[in-house]
Image (tube, rainbow, N blue to C red):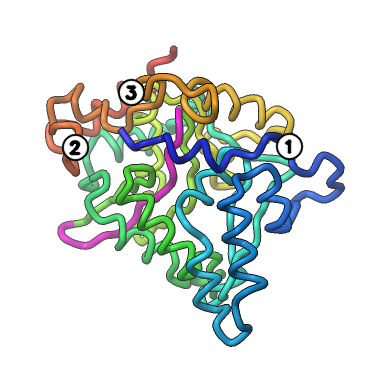
Amino acid sequence: MPDLDSVALFLPRKWDLNPHARVGVTLVRPSAVFRGFSSGAVALWRHVHLATPRSERHLAAMQMLDPQLVLGAYAVGVFPMADHREADSVYWVEPRSRAVMPLDGFHLSRSLRKTIAADRFRVTADVAFGRMIQLCAEPVEGRPDTWINVGIERAFTALHGLGFAHSIECWEGDELVGGLYGLALGRAFFGESMVSRRTDASKVALAWLVARLKAGGFTLLDCQFQTAHLASLGAVEISRTDYVALLSAALDGVVGSAAGSASAAGDFRALDRLAGAAPASAATVSGPVAGHDIVQLLVQTS
């Protein structure tokens, strides 16, 4: 399990940072994110923005987005985005309405069920995290740029190395044709981005993720913003107040000053052990975990 001791150092005292926001998306000033954080985080911000010469701030901005800061932000419902791939800084976003995927409410259509059961794609977990985040950041038709800049990519790559960030990959032969990546903290999983280079690849990846989270005892799958694509798969939009309540429950006993045993956290590897695919520390493939196993998990309700 990832070490959660350092995460508590960066947890703000208040969950809702912007109670009076009047717009659908709140752009949170970095100083607001730091309110209530440790003196070390405040010192880091001051170093980057006050002590660093303007000519050097591009590099400093990238260095500022360190993994502990990112974990602390997600723990209060705030996440970073950039204006474009080459942006030298990020802004912090707190949606007034949040899209979440109820783990017992995934919409498994007849056609998607057939695709999964037939193992049309080879599905892996954490085998190609770096390639996945880069694929998600590539421009596509209708979206010439991305919110994933170099700073975000570096931060999530570091979080992957620490055991917090994960990816689900879909392969066609040796070609990576779709998947997703996100962040696991406590019993919450924060979906960051998904991509499809073949029909239904992102849907299959999301289905495998939901099954994996159900097997691992997770309670919250955060999808950030609602889209027609996510809605067709069962995602619902809830208020910020309701989201914070779900997030608080998902992190209870795991993160913060009242944190207890790490066993209270969700187990991203539980699916592999249930199927005898691999030890918990190994990168895993669909191996003995087959599409029909995923379908069975998805149609089960708690």
Locate residue 97 relative to residue 61 in the image: left or right. right
- Which residue does the numbered mark 3 point to in the structure image? 215
Residue pictured at 40% horizontal, 50% vertical: 181
Of the 4 image quadrants, the one containing the C terminus is top left
Q: Which mark is residue 281?
A: 2
Q: Are marks 1 and 2 in contact (CB under 8 Å)?
A: no
Disc 1 marks a residue whose amino acid type is Asp
Of the 4 image quadrants, the one containing the N terminus is top left
Q: Dot 1, how many residues are within 10 Å of its Cα: few (below 14), some (14-19), or many (20+)?
A: some
Q: Is residue 116 visible?
A: yes
Q: Dot 3, how many residues are within 10 Å of its Cα: few (below 14), some (14-19), or many (20+)?
A: many
Locate residue 258 relative to residue 262 in the image: left or right. right
Q: Nearer the viewer, residue 273 or 151?
A: 151
Magenta: main secondary structure: strand
Which is closer to the viewer, label 2 or label 3? 2
| Image quadrant in which you'd find residue 92 | bottom right
Per the rendered image, the range of residues in magenta is 173-186
Residue pictured at 41% horizontal, 44% vertical: 203
